[in-house]
Image (cartoon, grey):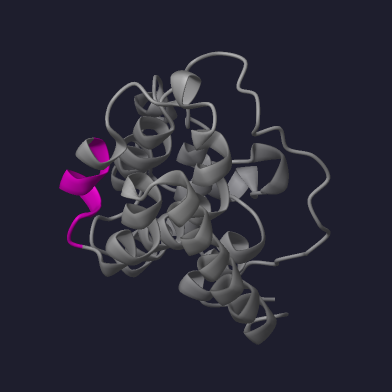
């Protein structure tokens, strides 16, 4: 049982993903009982499910993290074009800012987790299908939003801008750091 929202966000980020709706369980009655923006404002972001997840995090009392392992995720062959930097960078920031207090502990934890966990985990594999996953230069989209965060420069910028082979090497370093972090924070 985790009682600190930042610790909970970090645990989920190290081992999973808030965007995978099947991996996050929230208490619907508690979410509906608190005042929140209409969930529909997250429409057209490809991340509408985060509206109730972030509402639950915004009113976090305690959380349980159960590590069962990943069963299946398809990242290699997107079925339709979408811009991953727009969806998981720009839109992630937009939805988190709509449903979490900007600048709050939980908002910063969610944004930092996205830079530390999601991008280093998924960007490299998805970028192999650049014609389906990039419609604008990724750094151009990400920099205005995340450029003041050190984790952007450490974890994301090299993956967005380095040549593929060098980015793969940097990713290996980041995976090693995350492996140590996971072991250090194991429940």
Question: Quick check: 185 left or right of 55?
Answer: right
Q: Residue at x 46, y 38 (%)?
A: 51
Q: In which quarter of the image is the N terminus?
A: bottom right
Relative to 25, residue 152 above or below: below
The image shows residue 116 at horizontal and vertical percentages of 45, 62
Q: In which quarter of the image is residue 154?
A: bottom left
Magenta span: predominant SS is helix
Relative to 47, residue 105 above or below: below
Question: How many tags in the picture?
Answer: 0
Tell me if I can see residue 61 in this picture.
no
Q: Nearer the viewer, residue 17 or 154?
A: 154
The segment highlighted magenta reads 141-148
Q: Quadrant of residue 110?
A: bottom left
Q: Which residue is drawn at 39% across and 26% down?
A: 134
Q: Nearer the viewer, residue 151 or 36?
A: 151
Tell me if I can see residue 63 in this picture.
yes
Q: Which residue is drawn at 65% across and 31% down?
A: 76
Residue 144 magenta: yes
The image shows residue 118 at horizontal and vertical percentages of 51, 52
The image shows residue 146 at horizontal and vertical percentages of 24, 53
Q: Residue at x 73, y 37 (%)?
A: 73
């Amino acid at each position: 049982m985790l009682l600190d929202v930042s610790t909970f966000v970090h645990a989920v980020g190290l081992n999973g993903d808030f965007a995978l709706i099947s991996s996050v369980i929230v208490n619907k009655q508690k979410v509906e009982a608190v005042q929140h923006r209409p969930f529909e404002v997250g429409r057209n972001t490809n991340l509408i499910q985060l509206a109730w997840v972030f509402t639950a995090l915004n009113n976090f009392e305690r959380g349980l993290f159960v590590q069962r392992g990943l069963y299946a995720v398809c990242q290699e062959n997107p079925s339709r074009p979408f811009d991953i930097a727009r969806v998981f960078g720009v839109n992630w920031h937009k939805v988190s800012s709509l449903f979490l207090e900007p600048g709050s502990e939980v908002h910063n934890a969610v944004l930092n987790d996205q830079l530390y966990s999601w991008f280093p985990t998924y960007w490299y594999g998805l970028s192999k299908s650049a014609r389906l996953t990039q419609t604008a230069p990724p750094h151009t989209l990400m920099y205005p939003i995340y450029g003041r965060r050190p984790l952007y420069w450490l974890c994301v910028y090299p993956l967005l801008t380095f040549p593929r082979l060098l980015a793969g090497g940097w990713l290996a370093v980041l995976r090693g750091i995350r492996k140590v972090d996971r072991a250090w924070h194991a429940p």
